[in-house]
Structures are given as structure tokens and as C-alpha cells.
Image: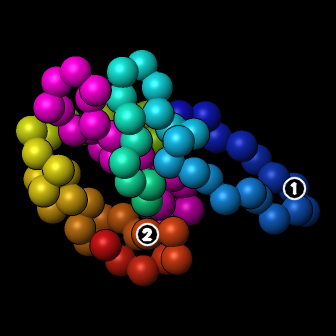
Amino acid sequence: MRFNFFYGLKPMKHRAEDFSRKGYECNLLLQNKSGQPVAVSRNKELCIWKVECNFSCVYFSTFEEALAYCKGRFFDADGKAV
């Protein structure tokens, strides 16, 4: 993931399409407690789901497992807990 730093201006909203790459399609975009983006992506060829936060990735076999991992850890775009 690439992080952008903004000084004095409001940052632009991230879109899920911005985090789709290398065979993975980002389906859900969340944020962590410090406001950095968290991407929940699906592999286009295999049925593998990936949760990316900072420099770490966690892989799951279903979307429900990925959401269960995100529950209580991350927030949606409005700042509400998942």
C-alpha cells in the first residue's frame, strides 16, 4: 500500500479501486484506529481473500472469515466499528 501525507489540506477520500492490483480486486475498504486504509481483497483466479493493513497481510478462504477478523479491529469510512 502507498501512503500519502497531507499538510494543511483535507485528504481526498480513498476508493476501493485504488487498492486493486496484482490479481487482487479490492472489495471493501476500511480504516484502522489511526485512519490508515485497510483493504479487503479477493484473488481473481483463486477463491482467496486478503486483509492488508500497514505492511502485513492475512489470508482467508471466505469473505465471512475475513469480515470476522476485521470485526472489532477496524472501522468503516465513517469511523463506525465493523
Residue 36 against residue 41 in the figure, above or below:
below
Instruction: Give the secondary structure at mark 2.
Output: loop
User: Which residue is disc 2 drawn over?
Assistant: 76
| Residue 14 spot, x, y in % from top left | 61, 53
Query: What percent of the width, then of the height, locates residue 50?
Result: 27, 38
Mark 2, Cα crowd under 10 Å, few <14 / some 14-19 / many 20+, is some
Q: Residue drawn at (14%, 31%), measured in percent from left and top?
A: 47
* Quarter that holds the C terminus: bottom left
Q: What's the distance in space between the residues labelled 2 and 1, CA to CA?
A: 23 Å
Please tell me the numbered disc located at residue 7: 1
Q: x and y percent of residue 77 in the render?
A: 51, 69
Q: Position of residue 59 (x, y in %)?
A: 19, 36
Q: Is residue 48 magenta?
A: yes
Q: Is residue 19 magenta?
A: no
Q: Nearer the viewer, residue 64 or 38?
A: 64
Q: Nearer the viewer, residue 37 or 17?
A: 17
Q: Marks 2 and 1: which is nearer the front?
A: 2
> Viewed as shown, does residue 77 lie left or right of 71?
right
* Residues in magenta, as a range: 31-51
Is residue 43 shown above or below 68?
Answer: above
Comes first in the chain, label 2 or label 1: 1
